[in-house]
Image (cartoon, helix red, strand yellow):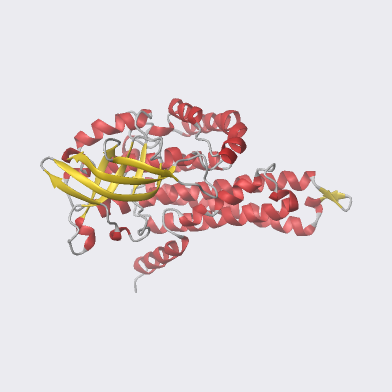
């Protein structure tokens, strides 16, 4: 069982009250600043403070460590609701919670007590340090090396596209503690790396979408980490720690995709009633109705797949197939609905005065992040065959 389901006493009334609070926060605090902050690529410091008050940084962290202990099925609904208005802020707590989940799942008791309460409160915010300039899906190809020096590891290497690394306080850092190991994954370890000397944020990357959130290039130059920060206290388990968090990560991405699809459809439905051509609202034209009908159906299908994957995760089942299906379908639904909404808005969609262009820019990342959709289909097929072996 996952830690969150073992301690959680969350009721349907608790869920309703929490989601009502999230909806109110999104309407009051997120929606009014989305356009400005996205266009200017400004980090939403005030939103972060409000996220702390809402408990979002501890959403899925166990209650014994100061978190809310939410099941993934409830957490995914939060992500969808926020993403339906502005997807980017969800990255601030999504990546952070995947880091926390790895510590809660695989860390030593000392590591859990040291880090999880600080993470639940938002005092320490982090993410995952996996990707490198020449390494994305193929994690075993990383080149960042951690060499033992007494009771410390000395880290040298580079990471890229690391969410929360600019304004956060640390990351879960994937390194090679034995670069010569075969198979390669046996030489990989994961370090809980807080910022310090040699931990260098070398560049905040400019992006097409997913703006306002710090995605940075990192350089590690003789960066020293105490051996007590080796996740789980055992070398050679880094690859397993990394892939062990992918199910929750893909449910997160799926929830974001579903949110983008829902938000884009909502904007399109409203605009189709306001915009008139040939003497009537364009929602009365069959061509627009065909688009809206398909969009609405994809939104609901995406949300159901997300819920199915989240419930499988909560039950403790292996759910890489379900998470892959949800991630694949919901992210593609986000792209489809954003693209169709652009067509419904017509020429107005190309104006930055209309928010639909942000959904269009943000959507494609969901097809790439946490494993490309091409990879998801391969995972789905392999698990399909394995579960139905003749």
Query: How far from the left and from the top, in percent, is residue 272?
Result: 76, 48
Residue at left offset 36%, top offset 53%: 131
Q: Residue at x 86, y 49 (%)?
A: 280
The quadrant holding residue 343 is: bottom right
Of 188 and 323, nearer the camera is: 188
Q: Quadrant of residue 10?
A: top left
70 left or right of 336?
left
Figure check: 326 above or below 107: below
Check the image and report above or below for 4 versus 129: above
Using residue 207 as the reference point, say whether residue 186 is left or right of it. left
Left or right? Give the position of 47 relative to 378: right
Where residue 47 appears, as percent x and y from the top left, is: 50, 30
Q: Position of residue 137 (x, y in %)?
A: 37, 59
Q: Outermost residue, left direction?
A: 150
Q: Is residue 157 above or below residue 89?
A: below
Q: Residue at x 50, y 56 (%)?
A: 367
How many discs mark residues in the rendered view? 0
Is any atom of residue 57 visible in this view? yes
On the image, the x and y values in percent for residue 93 come to 43, 38
Residue depicted at 34% across the width and 38% down the height:
4
* Viewport quadrant of the N terminus: top left
Q: Nearer the viewer, residue 4 or 61?
A: 61
Nearest the eye: 371 or 248: 371
């Amino acid at each position: 069982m996952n830690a969150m389901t073992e301690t959680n006493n969350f009721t349907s009334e608790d869920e309703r009250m929490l989601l009502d609070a999230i909806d109110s926060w999104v309407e009051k605090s997120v929606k009014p600043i989305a356009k400005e902050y996205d266009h200017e690529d400004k980090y939403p410091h005030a939103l972060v403070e409000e996220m702390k008050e809402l408990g979002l940084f501890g959403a899925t962290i166990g209650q014994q460590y100061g978190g809310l202990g939410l099941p993934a099925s409830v957490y995914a609904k939060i992500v969808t609701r926020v993403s339906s208005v502005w997807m980017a802020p969800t990255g601030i707590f999504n990546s952070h919670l995947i880091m926390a989940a790895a510590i809660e799942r695989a860390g030593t008791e000392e590591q859990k007590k040291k880090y999880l309460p600080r993470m639940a409160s938002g005092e320490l915010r982090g993410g995952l340090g996996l990707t490198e300039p020449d390494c994305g899906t193929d994690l075993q190809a990383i080149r960042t090396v951690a060499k033992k020096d007494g009771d410390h590891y000395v880290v040298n290497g580079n990471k890229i596209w690391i969410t929360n690394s600019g304004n956060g306080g640390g990351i879960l850092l994937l390194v090679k503690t034995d670069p010569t190991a075969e198979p390669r994954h046996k030489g990989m370890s994961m370090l809980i790396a807080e910022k310090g000397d040699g931990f260098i944020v070398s560049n905040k990357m400019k992006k097409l979408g997913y703006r306002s959130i710090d995605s940075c290039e990192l350089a590690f130059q003789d960066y020293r980490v105490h051996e007590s920060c080796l996740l789980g206290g055992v070398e050679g388990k880094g690859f397993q720690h990394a892939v062990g968090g992918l199910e929750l990560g893909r449910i997160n991405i799926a929830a974001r995709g579903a949110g983008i699809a829902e938000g884009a459809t909502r904007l399109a439905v409203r605009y189709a009633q306001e915009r008139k051509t040939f003497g009537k609202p364009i929602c009365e034209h069959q061509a627009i109705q065909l688009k809206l009908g398909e969009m609405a159906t994809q939104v609901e299908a995406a949300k159901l797949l997300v819920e199915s994957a989240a419930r499988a995760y909560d039950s403790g089942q292996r759910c890489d197939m379900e998470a892959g299906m949800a991630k694949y379908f919901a992210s593609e639904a986000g792209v489809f609905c954003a693209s169709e909404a652009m067509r419904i808005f017509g020429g107005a969609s190309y104006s930055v005065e209309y928010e639909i262009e942000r959904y269009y820019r943000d959507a494609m990342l969901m097809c790439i992040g946490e494993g490309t959709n091409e990879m998801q289909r391969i995972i789905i097929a392999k698990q399909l065959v394995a579960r139905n072996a003749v």
